[in-house]
Structure formats: structure tokens, C-alpha cells
Image (cartoon, rainbow, N blue to C red):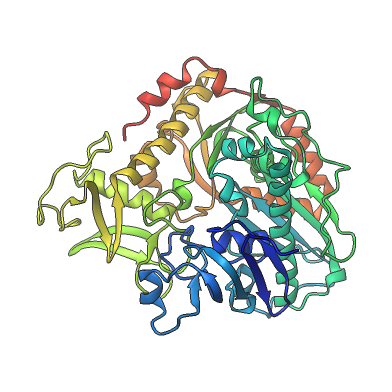
């Protein structure tokens, strides 16, 4: 029966699905399991989500005309909406697997590890014989259409149909990525022996189809913390690979935190150590050098992952990865060969630190009114475009007052959480020996700029160590050995959870921590 909703047809396989009018083409493709690269977070900046499409679509934007002159059917999936029946040629889509060299050596038995972040999803191919891993670029979590944070996803899951859709969409994205990888690398589908997953508690629950409602209401309960025995059906994946999900510690302390704890423990960091995973949901733990481990989580938002920023994007081609002061002005280090299209998390940290150092912003984060020529690094001064204050970073990439405020919310939350953990553990900052930083930043963060912005308390005697994406590392380890999961569970059971939402001092501490 013909529906009044627009129908999207995938070519050449002919699959169809109906969507509400004005649904973003990107969201429709995600829901149908086509994982398009979106390093700029769907802002229309990078051009990586381009597909060939025709039919009932919104008019081409100025950016599309600029990027694809004379090609009426090449469209940006992140800005194009469905107005009527339309077709998309999926072989034109740029997916994460397409960036991988076909010559990757993989044994007959392999696994796939998946880090399910609130904002992005990243996966890794694991050779179960040699233990070697091959990581793929991240892609946007397709659940983003229901909100950018876990609270929004919990609220959306309040309706049974939507909860099932959240689960179905996430599983579909993972299944599509697995199949795409197998095709791109000519992997034997029967050789897939293990699928492992790490993520915050809400993401893990939605993957498994568990009820997330109790996580979002007082007393914020995660009734299930271990997931042995739960199945995750993937109709399109051959064979019966073992499916492993990292255990969680509490409602907002998930498998990503537990995985980071286990990875760092096996790396020998057992002294007085503070760990922070910089993501949309910031998670921290503090070890006292004995057997005690305190842990907390805080809502940092996706700014450091390049989202909710005017020109933010993931660390992909065209992203400003670093900004430095040069003798002739500001020097932008851009990933890839082309011009700057946006800025990723490491560049955002550099930009704000330099704005602060140059006196272009105050410690409160507010722009200082400056005229062109007053600053060598920011020669245009503070621009005011229709009431929006912003500074030029490189080419047509800017940072606005709102962008700076979003970063302040992240640093305020993490600094307040760090201070409260120290208080609960009774450890003065000068006794901390190691500060471990995990997340998508990897080893590319400028630590002096990070410290200058006060994301954490000052630890004068600590060694700062970058551990990269420990959530994905943990999923890789789980692929290789069940012993790793046992070790993670044993450490998890020693954690004292510090509930910041129940701490009467947190809100006041958070406000005090907003200034740079």
C-alpha cells in the first residue's frame, strides 16, 4: 500500500524505506544502514557525506553549488532533506571502511571491536592469531537524531516504539559497518569469531535492548552491570561470533570507564593516579595507591569531539589539528593536503589557550573588544557578524563566543569533578603521581594548553600520560581474551561511586570552575 511518506530507494540493490517529509537524507541513510562519513558533524563544511541522489529532494544549497558546480545530482547528505520519493546510489558513499588499505594482513580468524560513544562510533579489526589491531575512522552515532547527550536518548526511549528504534538504528549501523569492512578487505565472513563492545551505560543498554528509564530518574539505577548471556542479533552477519560487552560500574559509569581502568591497570598505573576520559560524558577515576578507587562522571557535552561548535569536526582531512604562535602570526596545522575546513578537539584547545594568552578573551571566556591589527595572532580583531562575536582562526574557519562557552561548560564540569574526587579520597593534588588522559585526542593534545585552560586541578608533581581511546583498546582486549573481562570486573567491584548529582557541593563548585 502506497504511503503518504516519501520513499527512499537505495540503488543498485533496490531496498526501500519510508520517512517523514523533511527527514535529513543523512539520517535516512543511517537508519537504512548506510554509514556515510561525517567528520564535520553534519554542518555541510567538509563535503565527505556527498552522494549521488535524485528525485524529491530539497533545493541545492550554496555550499553544494560551490563544492559541486555543474553536478545537479551530487548532494550533501547532511543538509539535503526528503521532500518526495528519491533515490540514492550507495556505491558513491564515502564510508569509514573505504579509507582502509585493502592490503591489511589478517589471519583466518578475526574479531571486530566497537567503541560506542554518545557522539561517535569507532571500530577496530582484531587479528585473533597475531593480536594485531587495525583501527578505522569514527563515524557519527546514528542515534544523534534523538539528541546529542545520554539524557536526551533516555528521554526519547520513554516511548516503546522509539526505544526499539534507537536499538535497531545502532545495531543496523554496526552490522552495516561490519559487512562493509568484510567487503572492502575481502575478509571471509565465516572468519568473524568475536564482536566486542565498550561504551557508557546508556549506549550499552540501548545496544542490548535493555530499559534505560531507571538510569535517568532518581535514584539513577543500573540494574544490570554484567552482560554475559545477553545476545545481540545481527541478521546480516554470518556465523555465530562470540559477543562480549564490557561490564559497567553504575548508571553513568560505563564500560568505557571500566575498560579504561583495566587498560591502565595492566599498563602499571596503580599508584596515586587520576584518569579522565574526555568525551561527551566525561568519566574520571582516582586511585589512592592502595586498594581504593573512587570514580565519578560529569556531563561535558560533545564540544571537544568537534560537535556543537560552529566549525567543529572530527580529526579528519581539512581539520585544524593544532594552532601555534609563529613569528609572522598564527600558524594552523591542517590535516591532509587541502585548506582548513573546520577544527577538531586538539585545535579547539590550542585556539582558546592562544586567545586567552593574547588577551583576546578574558578568563571569564568573554571576548575583549579589539580592533584589527592589535593582535599579531588575530589580526582581524574580534569580529561582530550580526551580533555574533567571533575570531578568525584560518581561512574561513572561526571560533565564536558560543563555542567558547560550550568548552567552558566541559572544563567546568571536569574540573569540579576532579576536585570533588580528591576531596572524597582525601588526597591533596600535590600527591598525585600520574594524570592519565584518554579519549579521541590520542597523543595529540598540547598538554600545556590543556593545563592552561584548567580542565583539571593543578597537579604540580604529576606525570601526564596520553592513553588514546582506552574504550576501544578495552574492546580489542576483550576480543582477544575473556581473562581481560574478568580482570575488568574485579577492578570494577573495587570502585566507590561518587554521585556528583547527589553532592550538594557540586553545583557551586561547577560555577566556580567555569573561568579559565
Residue 189: horizontal and vertical position, in percent? 83, 71
Furthest residue toward top? 504
Instruction: Please indicate whether residue 207 sits to the left or right of residue 371 in the image.
Output: right
- Residue 485 falls in which quadrant of the image? top right
* Residue name at image x 86 percent, y 41 percent: 228
Seen in the picture, residue 457 relative to 195 is either above or below; the reply is above
For the N terminus, give its image quadrant: bottom right
Residue 494: horizontal and vertical position, in percent? 72, 27
Residue 250: horizontal and vertical position, in percent? 68, 30
For the question of whether residue 399 can be seen, the reply is yes
Residue 76: horizontal and vertical position, in percent? 48, 69
- Residue 126 falls in which quadrant of the image? bottom right
For the question of whether residue 37 can be seen, the reply is no
Instruction: Please indicate whether residue 145 sits to the left or right of residue 64 in the image.
Output: right
* Residue name at image x 50 percent, y 22 percent: 420
Seen in the picture, residue 334 relative to 122 is either above or below; the reply is below
Seen in the picture, residue 265 relative to 123 is either above or below; the reply is above
Total numbered circles: 0
Furthest residue toward bottom? 70
Instruction: Please indicate whether residue 114 sits to the left or right of residue 316 in the image.
Output: right
For the C terminus, give its image quadrant: top left
Seen in the picture, residue 151 relative to 266 is either above or below; the reply is above
Amino acid at each position: 500500500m502506497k504511503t503518504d511518506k516519501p520513499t527512499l530507494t537505495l540503488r543498485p540493490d533496490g531496498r526501500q524505506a519510508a520517512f517523514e517529509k523533511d527527514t535529513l537524507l543523512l539520517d535516512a541513510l543511517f537508519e537504512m544502514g548506510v554509514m556515510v562519513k561525517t567528520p564535520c558533524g553534519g554542518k555541510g563544511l567538509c563535503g565527505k557525506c556527498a552522494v549521488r541522489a535524485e528525485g524529491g529532494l530539497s533545493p541545492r544549497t550554496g555550499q553544494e553549488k560551490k563544492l559541486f558546480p555543474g553536478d545537479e545530482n551530487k548532494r550533501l547528505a547532511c543538509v539535503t532533506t526528503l521532500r518526495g520519493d528519491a533515490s540514492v546510489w550507495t556505491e558513491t558513499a564515502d564510508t569509514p571502511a573505504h579509507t582502509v588499505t585493502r592490503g591489511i594482513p589478517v589471519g583466518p580468524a578475526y574479531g571486530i571491536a566497537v567503541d560506542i560513544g554518545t557522539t561517535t562510533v569507532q571500530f577496530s579489526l582484531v587479528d585473533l592469531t597475531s593480536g594485531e589491531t587495525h583501527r578505522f575512522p569514527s563515524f557519527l552515532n546514528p542515534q544523534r537524531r534523538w539528541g546529542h547527550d545520554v539524557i536526551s536518548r533516555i528521554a526519547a526511549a520513554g516511548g516503546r516504539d522509539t526505544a526499539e528504534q534507537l536499538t535497531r538504528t545502532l545495531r543496523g549501523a554496526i552490522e552495516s559497518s561490519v559487512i562493509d569492512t568484510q567487503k572492502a578487505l575481502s575478509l571471509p565472513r565465516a572468519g568473524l569469531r568475536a564482536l566486542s563492545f565498550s561504551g557508557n551505560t546508556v549506549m550499552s543498554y540501548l545496544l542490548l535492548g535493555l530499559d534505560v528509564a531507571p538510569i535517568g530518574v532518581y535514584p539513577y539505577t543500573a540494574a544490570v552491570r554484567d552482560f554475559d548471556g545477553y545476545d545481540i542479533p545481527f541478521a546480516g552477519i554470518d556465523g555465530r561470533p562470540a559477543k562480549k560487552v564490557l561490564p559497567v560500574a553504575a548508571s553513568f559509569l560505563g564500560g568505557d570507564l571500566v575498560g579504561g581502568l583495566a587498560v591502565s591497570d595492566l599498563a602499571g598505573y596503580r599508584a596515586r593516579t587520576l584518569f579522565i576520559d574526555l568525551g561527551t560524558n566525561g568519566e574520571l577515576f582516582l586511585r589512592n595507591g592502595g586498594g581504593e578507587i573512587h570514580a565519578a562522571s560529569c556531563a561535558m557535552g560533545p564540544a571537544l569531539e568537534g560537535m556543537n561548535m560552529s566549525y567543529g569536526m572530527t580529526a579528519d582531512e581539512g581539520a585544524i589539528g593544532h594552532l601555534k604562535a609563529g613569528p609572522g602570526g598564527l600558524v594552523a596545522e591542517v590535516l591532509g593536503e587541502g585548506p582548513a575546513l573546520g577544527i577538531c578537539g586538539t585545535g579547539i584547545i590550542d585556539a582558546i589557550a592562544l586567545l586567552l594568552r593574547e588577551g583576546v578573551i578574558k578568563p571569564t571566556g568573554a571576548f575583549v573588544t579589539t580592533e584589527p591589527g592589535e593582535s599579531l595572532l588575530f589580526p582581524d580583531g574580534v569580529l561582530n557578524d550580526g551580533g555574533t562575536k567571533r575570531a578568525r582562526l584560518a581561512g574561513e574557519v572561526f571560533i565564536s563566543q558560543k563555542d567558547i562557552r560550550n568548552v567552558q561548560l566541559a572544563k567546568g564540569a571536569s574540573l569540579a569533578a576532579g576536585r570533588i574526587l580528591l576531596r572524597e579520597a582525601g588526597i591533596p593534588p600535590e600527591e598525585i603521581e600520574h594524570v592519565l588522559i584518554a579519549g579521541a585526542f590520542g597523543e595529540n593534545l598540547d598538554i600545556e594548553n590543556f593545563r592552561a585552560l584548567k580542565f583539571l586541578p593543578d597537579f604540580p608533581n604529576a606525570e601526564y600520560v596520553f592513553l588514546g581511546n582506552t574504550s576501544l583498546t578495552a574492546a580489542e582486549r576483550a576480543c582477544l581474551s575473556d581473562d581481560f573481562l574478568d580482570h575488568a570486573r574485579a577492578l570494577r567491584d573495587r570502585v566507590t561511586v561518587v554521585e556528583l548529582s547527589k553532592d550538594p557541593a557540586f553545583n557551586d563548585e561547577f560555577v566556580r570552575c567555569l573561568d579559565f
